[in-house]
Amino acid sequence: MSQDVSQFVATVRRIPLFAGLNPTQAVSILKVCDRTSVEAGNVVCRSGDRSDSMFILLTGVLSVRLEDGTQVAKIEPVAPVGEMGLFTEEPRSATVVAAEACSLFELGKYKLQGAMRQNKEIEINISRNLISILSQRLRDANSELSFLRGVVADQGTGEVEVPDTEESPLPPDTL
C-alpha cells in the first residue's frame, strides 16, 4: 500500500462513523469517495439542501453557519460533515462554507450503500457506529436539557414544567 493510501486509510478510520474498519474495508470506502477541492469562500453545502452525500475534510477549515450567516462552528481536519443526512434523509441543517482553501473527500449515499451491500462486515460496523454516535448525541442533548431545566429552576420560577413522558421525545429515565 502506498504511503498516500496508507495515510488516507488512517484518516478514514479516525472518523467515528468508520471507526473499527480494517485497512481493506477502509480502502473499500475510499474507492467510492470522490476527492474535491473548494476555494475559500465557496459553499460546500447549503442549509435546506438534500443530504445525499457526506464530506470528509482533509485539509483547510470549514465554517458552519446558520441561515442568517452566524458562524456556529469551525470544522478542522480530519472531520466528517453531513454524515447523518446519509441515513436520515433530513435536509441539511446548516450552510458549510470553506473558511480557507479545502481538500475533501465526498461520499455519496448510494455509493456508501453499495459498499455496505458488498461487504456485510462494513455494514455491521457502520451501523453499530451510527447507533453509538446517535446514542451519544441523545445523552448529550438530555444532559443539556437537564442543565437548562436547572437554570430555569434557579431563575426563581420555582416550577419546571416536565412534559408527559408519552409525548416527550426523550426516554423516561432521562426526565
Image: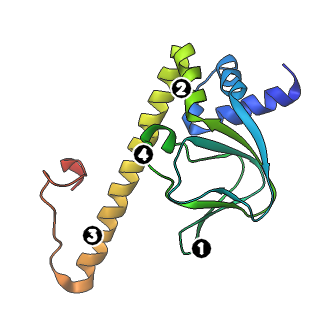
Disc 1 marks which residue? Answer: 69
Q: N-terminal of the two: label 4 or label 1? A: 1
Instruction: Give the numbered dot on residue 149.
Output: 3
147 in relation to 18, above or below: below
Q: N-terminal of the two: label 2 or label 4? A: 2
Q: N-terminal of the two: label 4 or label 3? A: 4
Instruction: Give the numbered dot on residue 136.
Output: 4
Question: Distance of mark 2 from mark 4, alpha carbons?
Answer: 23 Å
* Residue in front for this viewpoint, 52 or 122: 52
Tag 3: residue type?
Answer: Arg
Tag 4: residue type?
Answer: Gln
Instruction: Please report the residue visible at 19 percent of the width from the left and 83 percent of the height from the top.
Output: 157
Q: Position of residue 8 (x, y in %)?
A: 77, 32
**Res. 109 visible in picture:** yes
Looking at the rendered structure, the secondary structure element under dot 2 is helix
Q: Position of residue 169 (x, y in %)?
A: 24, 52
Question: Distance of mark 1 from mark 2, alpha carbons?
Answer: 33 Å
Disc 2 marks which residue? Answer: 113
7 in relation to 154, above or below: above
Looking at the rendered structure, the secondary structure element under dot 1 is loop
Q: Sort mark 4 into few (<14), some (14-19) or many (20+) by Cα contacts within 10 Å.
A: few
